[in-house]
Image (cartoon, rainbow, N blue to C red):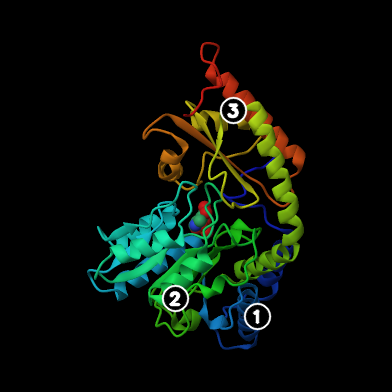
Amino acid sequence: MPYLDHNATTPLHPAARKAWLEAADRFWANPSSLYGQATAARDLLADCRERLADLLGCSDPGRIVFTSGATAANNLVARHFSRSAPSDALALLSPLEHPAVDVSIRAAFPGRVHDTGVDAEGVVAPKALARALDGAGHRPIAVVSIMAASNESGVLQPWPELASLCRDRHISFHTDAAQWLGKLPAAGLASCDWLTGSGHKFGGPRGVGFLVVPAKTRFRGDLGGPQEDGQHAGTENLPGIAGMVAALEVRQRDLPTIAERGAAHRDAAIELLRERLPTARVVSGNAARLWNTLAILIHRADSRKLVAALDRAGIEASTGSACSSGAASAARVVAAIAPSLGIAPGAPVGMVRFSAGPDTSAADWQAAIHALAEAVIVSAGPSRPPRVDLR
Ligand code: PLP
């Protein structure tokens, strides 16, 4: 059964499972305790932090704060800035942010969130960000948060340029790289002031992630015990951390092959899509995207019904983000790019997202497109022609 929902979660990689089990069996002591077994756990924790820092191109492992996932990391960013920023400060977000950023930052900055906007392909161009920053006038900007790669469309944002623009203006820049990590090279990501990652998006276990914070920041995450160098309270999930780091190491090592092969399979799938459903639109189809992600818009289709039909055909796909507000999240992405696709606001349009993994074959992709085409034709019914132009 082709599993094409890797942006929601991934199966545990055998290397991650091995590291997880080993840490759970042999290094189960609390890393903060003072006896020998705890020292061994503490050493493993330090080793994981150093290896992750290496992968991210981060010269200071002390910048890494382990969390219970990307949602937790993004909430920490929101809370940090709501505590530390002046009461009139703004936050700037792209309209494509995952709810873990969008909802938490909006709650922390009520009525004080500005939109960076995106271009016709869903990209935040550096010039547009510069304009949005200028548009804030004399009001302070606490943080700019722009995801590295979209969970919905896979579109890539030019985060190195966006980060450097913010750096030049002494404005904090955060990127949620939950979807970038494990799919594209991680090196250099730590040049962003704040960086979020999640283990289960790249073959690690669930319930573990990390936040990279700026060096020498007096960062206070959840309050309580002195874990994570006093930065974030709570006993570390050492098996999870060991599994996550092992998974990222393996993915990084295999990336060149995985990415090249994956992009070829995805591109062949797009060719087939054009033949079978010529009026369907690939979201952000002209922009640089993750090699594994293909989000497709279909006029007058019901996303949920299409996903159910795909499931019956043995294809596991998604309408978009798998969070509880998934439909709303996908709808925001569609709304942000709809005008450029000639889709009128509120026009009935369904979205299906396929997201592949390292082992997804060309045949899996082709089967997915054929199944989608069948589902669209069946759902259009005898009275309605399946080929309705979106424009
Ligand atoms: N950020 C992005 C971009 C995501 O795609 C996701 C998961 O869908 C999350 C955050 C939430 O990650 P986690 O499950 O680790 O909380």
The answer to which of 113 and 99 lies nearer the viewer is 113
The answer to which of 29 and 171 lies nearer the viewer is 171
Examine the image and state in which quarter residue 174 appears.
Answer: bottom left
Tell me: residue 343, above or below residue 260: above
Q: Could you tell me which secondary element the residue under label 3 belongs to? A: helix
Of labels 2 and 1, earlier in sequence is 1
Q: Nearer the viewer, mark 2 or mark 1?
A: 1
Q: Nearer the viewer, mark 3 or mark 1?
A: 3
Examine the image and state in which quarter residue 13 appears.
Answer: bottom right
Circle 1 packing at 10 Å, graded few (<14), some (14-19), many (20+), is some
Which residue does the numbered mark 2 point to in the structure image? 233
Q: Who's the residue at 73% across and 44% down the image?
A: 265
Tell me: residue 55, above or below residue 268: below
Find out if the beta carbon at label 3 lies less than 8 Å from the nearest ligand 1 atom.
no
Name the amino acid, label 2.
Ala
Q: Who's the residue at 64% across and 43% down the image?
A: 4
